[in-house]
Amino acid sequence: SDAERKQQLDLKKAGSFKPKNPPLVTNIYTADPSAHVFNEKIYIYPSHDIETDSAINDDGDHFAMRDYHVLSIDNHSEEVTDHGVALSLEDIKWASKQLWAPDAAEKSGQFYFYFPARDYDGIFRIGVAISDTPSGPFKAQENYIEGSFSIDPAVFKDDDGSYYLYFGGLWGGQLQNWRDGKFSIQDSYPADNEPALPAKMAKLSDDMLTLAEPVKDIVIVDESGAPITTGDNERRFFEASWLHKYQGKYYFSYSTGDTHKIAYGIADNPYGPFVYQGVILNPVLGWTNHHSIVFHQEKWWLFYHDSSLSSGKTHLRCVKKTELIHDINGKILPITAYD
Ligand code: FUB
């Protein structure tokens, strides 16, 4: 499979990679870091990667995670705290396996943790769990969010107090199984010259537990306004949605999947369309690339992962951080994670 090929290549190349940044923690494998500032600290909501006997394949069966930990950073020169298990598969009634990339949001002193997992029909859904502290433990709702599907939830709070949920992922993330608005076992993709399958989003309800509107497409367009197409693997959306706001503009960033980049587009509103701008993070060691962007202590930070802690095993990753810079025109300077 493509995943196996990339893993073998990465294991061969691992010796020559010189990572610029150390893992934030080394006691566990971590990935997909969603970072937010709550009570002046950075809280990081990562996936917790584990060893598994599951096959390495393009459906991502080897990402067999069973719980979540929360990490925090008080001050950038200090050690990162691992707050331990915040939510376990056993405590989520509707979920059967694969706790993939999560995110969290704060509203009125309550903390809402959003996470994808497969339900008992093998379909990825997005659930929410609640705590009165940012590090949990979180208590999962009885069922997944009605109308939710696919993976990689990311929550954005706008300046007017509205919250939006962005989500979606191809291949193992099953976005290609929802083309008619209902789950189909058959994969289906638009032709190479047609608009690519889009990420999804919806405003969240006031109680943060349901979608307040029908799910909408996030369309990424080129500078002439034409949607990025399926065949444009270098630029089209694959997974790992994130939204941040800079100088009044909305930046939607995402992974290009099989071309392994974090790319971004800019819009005037949270719904898009987003005009493609370029690459934020070049490919990292390991197949996946997944990130978040947050402002803390006068700087913008990029949180990301690679597989350096396991010398290149795609499903055993470690989260890292580095400074991110917007230039005077609001363009993000591309980052390479290696010397
Ligand atoms: O961690 C499992 C999956 O790998 C995530 O949901 C994707 O974004 C990719 O990083």
Image (tube, rainbow, N blue to C red):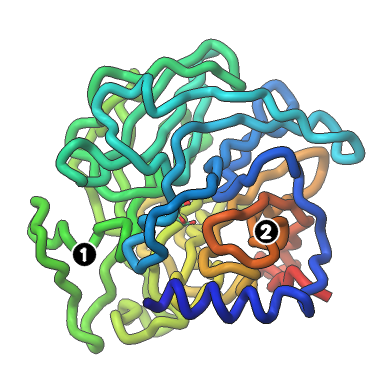
Q: Position of residue 23 (x, y in %)?
A: 76, 50
- Is 87 left, or right, of 304 in this rendering? left
Residue drawn at the location 48% of the way across and 58% of the way down: 252
**Dot 2 beta carbon under 8 Å from ligand 1:** no
Label 1 packing within 10 angstroms: few (<14), some (14-19), many (20+): many
Crowding near the residue tagged with mark 2, few <14, some 14–19, many ≥20 C-alpha atoms within 10 Å: some
In the picture, the quarter occupied by the C terminus is bottom right
Farthest front residue in view: 53
> Residue 32: x and y, percent?
55, 50
> Type of residue at label 2?
Ser
Mark 2 or 1, which is nearer the eye? Answer: 2
Residue beneath disc 1: 176
Q: Is residue 218 visible?
A: no
Mark linked to residue 213: none
**Distance Cα–Cα, label 2 vs label 1:** 31 Å
Give the side of residue 202 with respect to residue 257, left or right. left
Q: Earlier in the sequence, mark 2 or mark 1?
A: 1
Disc 1 residue type (three-letter): Gln
Q: Quadrant of residue 136?
A: top right
Q: Which residue is mark 2?
A: 310
Q: Position of residue 313 (x, y in %)?
A: 59, 63
Indicate whether 302 appears above or below 1: above
